[in-house]
Image (cartoon, rainbow, N blue to C red):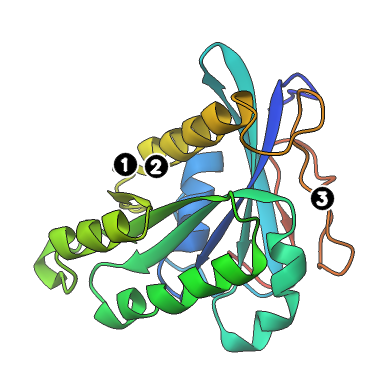
Amino acid sequence: MAESSNYDYLFKVVLIGDSGVGKSNLLSRFTRGEFNLESKSTIGVEFATRSIDVDGKTVKAQIWDTAGQERYRAITSAYYRGAVGALLVYDIAKHGTYDNVVRWLKELRDHADSNIVIMLVGNKSDLKHLRAVPTEEARAFSTENGLSFIETSALDASNVEGAFQTILTDIYRIVSSKSLESSGDVIKPSGGETILVTPTADDGGAQKGKGCC
């Protein structure tokens, strides 16, 4: 994409959740239309961008992905800084990743803006025969905690577009009604000096630390 600065809003959205739940493939599926069966754990941080239309405005999403392993916790504060949305991802076939949603939610509440828009995402919905987390259980948890909820499959692309469209639309409507602190017409994510990358990549490209998606 060669959008340059032709956008009305820029929103930083972070992906969080245990390692291996498919965060990187959700990112690559939405921003590049790609899925990699051989993808390894993300080491460090990467982000990619994509612009969509919301209510006639161009919304540019800057989506950040980091590793779920404990040893990367040191980047937490910088990773969340400036984020206005978060996708909290678990694997529908691994109940342990769903159990850990509570811990990830606490981390979000501790480190992110109190007005951040959060969506719970049950990924790998293509693994229906291995399902370990009932849809209704996750939906009830989301309702109790004020989260939106969707199930996706980065593999077959189902609901991936819908998940990002929904959260970006929710953020836009909050921001445009002045519920989130804004600076002029554009919400700009703060780069995060201590993080491994800064948000200056060419549009549509991904910045990476070491390692792969």
Check the image and report above or below for 154 versus 78.
Answer: above
Which of the pair 182/194 is nearer the observer?
Answer: 182
Answer yes or no: is residue 41 visible: yes
Q: Quadrant of the C terminus?
A: bottom right
Q: Which residue is mark 1?
A: 159
Distance, label 3 to label 2, CA atoms, is 24 Å
Where residue 211 appears, as percent x and y from the top left, is: 67, 72
Picture quarter containing residue 184? top right
Q: In the displayed image of the protein, which residue is found farthest to the bottom? A: 71
Label 3 residue SS: loop
Residue at the (57%, 50%) spot, across then down: 116
Which of the pair 77/113 is nearer the observer?
Answer: 113
Residue type, mark 2 in image: Ala
Where residue 200 appears, as percent x and y from the top left, is: 85, 45
Residue at the (53%, 27%) spot, across then down: 173
Where residue 23 appears, as percent x and y from the top left, is: 48, 61
Say the numbered circle drawn on residue 163: 2
Q: Residues within 10 Å of mark 3 (few under 14, many from 20)?
A: some
Q: Which residue is mark 3?
A: 190
Residue at the (72%, 21%) spot, across then down: 7
Q: Residues within 10 Å of mark 1 (few under 14, many from 20)?
A: some
Q: Earlier in the sequence, mark 3 or mark 2?
A: 2
Q: Residues within 10 Å of mark 2 (few under 14, many from 20)?
A: many
Residue type, mark 1 in image: Asn
Q: Quadrant of the N terminus?
A: top right
State which mark lies toward you, 3 or 1.
Answer: 3
